[in-house]
Image (spheres, rainbow, N blue to C red):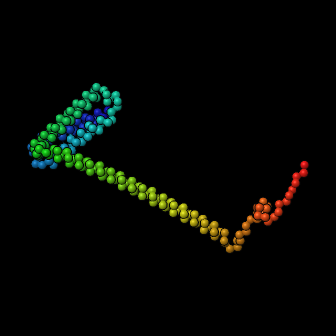
Amino acid sequence: MEFVTATLTGIALIKKSVDFVKENISTVNDIKGIATQIDAFFEGEAQMNKRSGKVSIKEQFGIESTASDFIDRKLLEEKRQELKNMINLRFGPTTWDQIIAERASKISEAKEQVRLQKIENRQRQKDLIDSLQTMGIVFCVICVLAIMIFIGVKAYADGYKYVPRDYTTQQKIWQGKIKKKNIQLVD
């Protein structure tokens, strides 16, 4: 249902725009007088194109939707040609082509701006992550140093003398400090 509404709205915008241009083409002195209606035409075209990718398989291959899409496309082409002819007759033979080229240029610039903004945002995010990682590493190093200093101060505090543990009997035997006793088992 949503795509039908989008199509009907698109068609209504296109018809309204073309009708307005028809009625007022002779009274305007420059293209600015009908620019909003040309924008509305392009908006209607965009709304018609928006729904083309959001159709279910049943609707895509149905006779009604196929015929409706075909007729809508033909009406769109007819209205576009009509608008092009009116504007070219009033303002010169290449005016419509210049409008289309300027529109394509602005769309391309807008897409480029969005692309550059995404790249800039990714770079900022990467820089933020790098900064957080660096701060984390510095924090860990500071913690390790603080623990080492704490242990060092504890170990060498006044009144404390380090006394190593005595070796085990086995270690003393290996070092040769004591001799191994030969014990024989009796059966």
Q: Quadrant of residue 59?
A: top left
Q: Is residue 184 above or below residue 178?
A: above
- At x 42%, y 58%, the residue is 127
Please state the horizontal and vertical placement of residue 49, each as a whole percent of the image.
27, 38
Q: Nearer the viewer, residue 94 or 80?
A: 94
Compared with 23, 178 (above or below) is below
- Indicate left or right for 128 with 66 as reference: right
**Image coords of residue 122 (percent x, y):** 39, 53
Q: Is residue 1 visible?
A: yes
Judge whether residue 36 can be spotted in this image: no
Q: Residue furthest right?
A: 187
Residue extending farthest top: 63
Q: Residue at x 23, y 32 (%)?
A: 72
In this view of the protein, which residue sits in the foreground, 46 or 94? 94
Give residue 178's position: percent from left, percent from top.
81, 64
Relative to 157, residue 180 above or below: above
Task: Indicate the position of residue 99 as horizontal and vertical percent values.
Answer: 18, 46
Residue at figure coordinates x 16%, y 44% from the top left: 96
**Which residue is at a point 20% across and 48% down the rendered structure image?**
102
Total labels drawn = 0
Task: Classify the position of the N terminus by image quarter.
Answer: top left
Q: Is residue 115 left or right of residue 45?
A: right
